[in-house]
């Protein structure tokens, strides 16, 4: 008998109110078995209605309700460690570990983080926001447990997409050599953010669709109703035998020395509980393969799993969201697609993010030149390098925060060989509600010291398209562009984009008292500061630098020399950022004009709405005016 009750309507509140009485996992373990289905229903209703106001990762969490209940029913956190890959599916875990009364604050300033956070709860064993981290981290915890002679359990929960990620496979290679007691849960729903791709995804699909598994799955509920206790051992072996030898002589994981069990229904709470009770007694590393449905219990999330992986506020009734002007990501996807239609050498690459980067536009119209390599940023960069050696023009679209993973490849394989790979870094700058794991605040710092690289950021949508056109024409080496999440100021691109001169900035206005240099999306703030300074009778120079590297040394030095103060603006950390490069430039040219900088501090910035965080950390017109005034006094 399954205790899933996902068929209840998300618009009608559940008849019970179990969740408000759950302050810790002990309360979950105290519930009667027949109450677990009611709890699952209430959790789904709570998530659907709460996230309609805040946004968040709805689909992944609806898919792990029964799994999370079962984990907390069998294991005892914080002594037992549950480590979640990415951890965007941790909302249910938060609800069951004393944070249900704060779920309405998730992803809001000073509210719950959208990912697991060690500083938020003792039950959050490991913080994460990127894929592929959990097996290695959990293995480290298991090794520490063994070193200290403790008896706790370590459970690593990873989605099937995480197994396309290099660190996951590296960890698999070490598990059997490191510990004898380790549980991996493979949550298989065929999706990460988009449909999973590659050989691993095909292998998992073959497992879950094999007729032997179907037979076991259909009988699983009857089994739980009729038998229990030691009989679970025979059933576990039956599951194991049914799934073996589908593609290879042995199951993939057993090649790594890990005992494989499954696939089983990830929405059958009682079956999950009995299986975990069995697995926790094993004295060897095990992996349990469960099949779940992303978005279970909410039809819009089932119909649009990509959209509901992570989204902003929506209407509960139909899942609709507010439409607005085109985002930078949408402009990128459309522009690169149109450029590729005119240039057959252009190809597009994403690392499991066609929807987020909007390369789904390219995929739809030019599928033969579109590549999704899965969650494998390092491979993506190397793959792009190989394409570039053969005269192709790869546009590699990866979020700024995820491009960090490919740093060595950018240095060693792309830049050192002067390969014309186009690095397109979405979410360059603050990523607001997603928090420190997703803020793109470090890419200027990790790119600007690399020899031969070109790096740009546009002040508006029109210039952004000009830069993409310039990238398509540039063949002298690597070229990168960073652009923010969401919308720009609304500038309409020209029908025919302009080719920009590499390293040439734009002098918007010439003055003599203050020199303002506003990079990218903070150019608008520099304009506001200019207006305020002019109201005070000051003469202001305003520069749109366009290029982070190479800087327009002639333009900046000329106007810095005659100004009393220079002020730079950037949506990036100040340490080793754009303003730091201007300071270095002026120093190297013996220009003593003081430089004030507006940007993010040398710390990991919390999550919250961008205006709130800018006000807190001094990225405001008022702070810029204060700094400039202090220099002029």
Image (tube, rainbow, N blue to C red):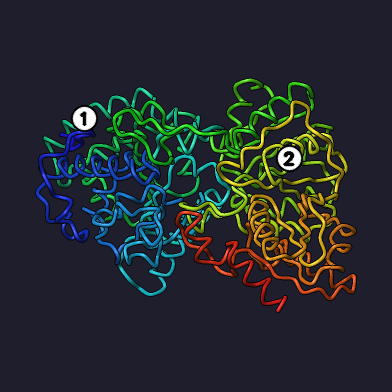
- Residue drawn 16% across the image and 58% down it: 27
Kindly report which numbered mark, 2 or 1, lies closer to the viewer in this rendering.
2
Q: Nearer the viewer, residue 463 or 69?
A: 463
Q: Residues within 10 Å of mark 2 (few under 14, many from 20)?
A: many
Give left or right: position of 495 versus 389: left
**Apparent side of residue 14 relative to residue 426 in the rendered image (left or right):** left
Question: Quadrant location of the N terminus?
Answer: top left
Identify residue for label 2: 463
Label number found at residue 551 = none
Instruction: Point out the tag, 2 or 1, that comes first from the N-terminus.
Output: 1
Q: Position of residue 290 (x, y in %)?
A: 34, 39
Q: Could you say which quadrant of the image residue 317 lies in?
A: top left
Residue 315, image x and y in percent?
33, 34
Q: The C terminus is located in which quarter?
A: bottom right
Residue at image point 70% right, 57% down? 444
Q: Which residue is painted at 87% across and 64% down in the image?
A: 557
- Disc 2, disc 1: CB below 8 Å? no
Percent from the top left, x then y, of residue 530? 69, 58
Q: Which residue is identified by label 1?
A: 7
Task: Say which of 284 and 138 sits in front.
Answer: 138
């Amino acid at each position: 008998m399954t205790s899933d009750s996902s068929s209840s309507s998300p618009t009608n509140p559940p008849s019970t109110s179990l969740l408000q009485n759950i302050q810790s996992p002990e309360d979950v373990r105290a519930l009667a078995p027949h109450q677990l289905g009611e709890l699952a229903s209430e959790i789904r209703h709570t998530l659907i209605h709460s996230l309609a106001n805040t946004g968040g990762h709805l689909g992944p969490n609806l898919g792990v309700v029964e799994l999370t209940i079962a984990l907390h029913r069998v294991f005892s956190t914080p002594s037992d460690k549950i480590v979640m890959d990415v951890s965007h599916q941790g909302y249910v875990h938060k609800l069951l570990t004393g944070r249900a009364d704060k779920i309405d604050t998730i992803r809001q300033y000073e509210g719950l983080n959208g990912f697991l956070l060690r500083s938020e709860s003792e039950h959050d064993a490991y913080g994460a926001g990127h894929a592929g981290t959990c097996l290695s981290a959990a293995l480290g915890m298991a090794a520490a447990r063994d070193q200290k002679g403790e008896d706790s359990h370590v459970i690593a929960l990873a989605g099937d997409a995480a197994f396309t990620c290099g660190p996951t496979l590296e960890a698999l290679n070490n598990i059997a050599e490191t510990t004898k007691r380790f549980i991996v849960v493979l949550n298989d729903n065929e999706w990460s953010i988009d449909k999973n791709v590659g050989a691993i995804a095909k292998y998992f699909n073959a497992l879950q669709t094999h007729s032997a598994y179907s037979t076991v799955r259909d009988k699983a509920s009857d089994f739980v109703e009729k038998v229990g206790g030691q009989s679970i051992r025979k059933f576990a072996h039956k599951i194991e035998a049914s799934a073996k030898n589908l593609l290879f002589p042995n199951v993939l994981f057993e090649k790594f020395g890990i005992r494989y069990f499954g696939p089983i229904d990830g929405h059958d709470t009682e079956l999950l509980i009995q299986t975990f009770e069995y697995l926790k007694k094993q004295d060897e590393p095990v992996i349990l393969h469960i099949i779940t449905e992303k978005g279970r219990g909410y039809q819009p999330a089932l119909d649009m799993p990509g959209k509901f992986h992570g989204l902003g506020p929506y209407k509960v009734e139909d899942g609709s969201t507010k439409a607005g002007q085109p985002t930078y990501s949408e402009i990128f996807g459309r522009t690169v697609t149109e450029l590729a239609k005119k240039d057959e050498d252009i190809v597009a690459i994403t690392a499991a993010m066609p929807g987020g980067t909007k390369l789904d536009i390219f995929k739809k119209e030019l599928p033969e030149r579109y590549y999704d390599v899965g969650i494998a940023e390092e491979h993506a960069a190397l793959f792009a390098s190989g394409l570039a050696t053969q005269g192709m023009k790869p546009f590699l679209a990866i979020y700024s925060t995820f491009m960090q993973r490919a740093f060595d490849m950018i240095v060693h394989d792309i830049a050192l060989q002067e390969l014309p790979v186009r690095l397109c870094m979405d979410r360059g700058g603050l990523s607001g509600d997603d928090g420190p794991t997703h803020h793109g605040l470090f890419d200027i710092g990790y790119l600007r010291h690399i020899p031969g690289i070109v790096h740009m950021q546009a002040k508006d949508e029109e210039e952004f398209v000009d830069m993409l056109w310039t990238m398509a024409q540039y063949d002298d080496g690597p070229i990168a562009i960073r652009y923010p999440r969401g919308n720009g100021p609304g500038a309409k691109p020209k029908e025919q984009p302009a080719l920009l001169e590499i390293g040439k900035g734009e002098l918007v206005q010439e003055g003599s008292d203050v020199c303002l240099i506003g990079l990218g999306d903070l150019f608008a703030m520099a304009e506001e500061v200019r207006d305020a300074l002019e109201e005070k009778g000051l003469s202001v120079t305003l520069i749109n630098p366009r290029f982070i590297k190479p800087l327009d040394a002639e333009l900046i030095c000329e106007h810095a020399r005659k100004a009393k103060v220079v002020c730079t603006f950037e949506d990036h950390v100040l340490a080793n950022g754009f303003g730091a490069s201007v300071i270095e430039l002026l120093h190297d040219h013996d220009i003593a004009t003081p430089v004030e900088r507006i940007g993010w501090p040398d710390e990991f910035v919390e999550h919250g709405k961008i205006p709130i965080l800018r006000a807190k950390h001094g990225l405001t017109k008022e702070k810029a005016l204060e700094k400039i005034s202090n220099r002029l006094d």
